[in-house]
Image: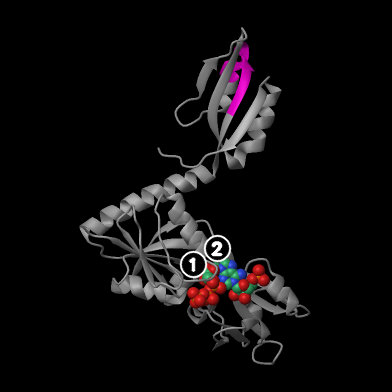
Amino acid sequence: MSKLKLAVQKSGRLHKDSMKLLKECGININNGVNRLKADADNFPMEVFFLRDDDIPQYVEDGVADIGIVGENVVLEKQKQVREVEQLGFSKCRLSIAVGKDKVYNSSQDLEGKRIATTYPVIVKQFLDKNKIQADIHEISGSVEIAPGIGLADCICDLVSSGSTLFMNGLKEVEIILRSEAELISGSDLGTEEQQLLDKFIFRIQSVKRAQNTKYILLNAPNDKLDIICNLLPGMKSPTVLPLAENGWSSIHSVVNENEFWGVIEKLKANGAEGILVSPIEKMVL
Ligand code: PRT
Ligand code: ZN
């Protein structure tokens, strides 16, 4: 029987959340320390542990069927891979930064400047799109020190909290890409591998949906049931059960994390009491 070969980062910012996602998808990986590959014991999957920069190439070559990698790396490497599913972790932005005292009004201020970056392909696309002529200095790391040592006028690098820029006397002036971890696949998987990938995506989507949703239980007077049920449409419709006390019911439903507080306020205003909210582990539709 075929196995789905998944490439994940060996160590670094993507590793922990990639392994957590597998766990939440019910896939057990027994990863011995320093191993390069490991098998799942309850899903036909084999996991390769690699440098993140190499993952798009391995997936293009078919050495791995799928991979988990930052969108920034996928766009920079320009390999023949499909972007299958956004995973919602390792969020960051690829930004232009200049010295904190420099004036910057628009991307046109980059004209004729020297930009140090580890993302020459994405920066070139950005410059071309905005019809800007500038020198790209590709360097392999510690980009943030380039302006300070006179190597470049500005940089283009990944930013999350912004503290690295701040500590190096730089300010973020232009976001050229917003990135997060994503699942990629080869463009031509075999039938069995594609079926396994579809199962894996189904599990990922159930996990992601659950992360955005809460389970809610509350008590409501029967004369307010209609209004309250309308506020809580649930997956199909809410569950309504009679309470031992006459004239009251218990309502069970789900509520979207983003609308959560607004809905709670309306429920209370309509007489709901004893509202309990708990996380959902998986949500299968
Ligand atoms: O060894 P390997 O090649 O596998 O790993 P790596 O060192 O190349 O990558 P790693 O682990 O640093 O990052 C992997 C991926 O995490 C990146 O490709 C991004 O998709 C994502 N990611 C998210 C980040 C950041 N946030 C991030 N802040 N990658 C790097 N950074 C760096 C950034 O380059 C800068 O040096 O963190 C610094 C800025 O952070 P703040 O918080 O100070 O703004
Ligand atoms: Zn890397």
Residue 203 in the image: state x and y as whole percent.
39, 48
Give the residue type at disc 1: Gly
Disc 2 element: loop
Q: Is mark 1 within 8 Å of ligand 1?
A: yes
Q: Which mark identifies residue 70?
A: 1
- Whether 183 is among the magenta residues is no
Q: Nearer the viewer, residue 151 or 40?
A: 40
Q: Is mark 2 within 8 Å of ligand 1?
A: yes
206 to 36, vertically: above or below: above
- Ligand 1's image quarter is bottom right
Q: Residues within 10 Å of mark 1 (few under 14, many from 20)?
A: many
Q: Which residue is mark 2?
A: 90
Residue 158 visible in the snapshot: no
Residue 191 in the image: state x and y as whole percent.
21, 57
Q: Residue at x 41, y 76 (%)?
A: 54
Residue 221 in the image: state x and y as whole percent.
63, 14
Q: Nearer the viewer, residue 148 or 131?
A: 148
Indicate left or right for 170 with 92 as reference.
right
Indicate left or right for 105 with 255 as reference.
right
207 to 47, vertically: above or below: above
> Residue reaching furthest top?
246
Q: Residue at x 59, y 36 (%)?
A: 278
Residue 80 in the image: state x and y as whole percent.
33, 71
Q: Residue at x 54, y 44 (%)?
A: 212
Query: Which segment did they paint magenta?
Result: 217-227
**In the picture, which quadrant includes the N terminus?**
bottom left
Discs 1, 2 touching: Cβ within 8 Å: yes
Disc 1 element: strand
Q: Residues within 10 Å of mark 2 (few under 14, many from 20)?
A: some
C-alpha separation, residue under disc 1 versus residue under disc 2: 7 Å
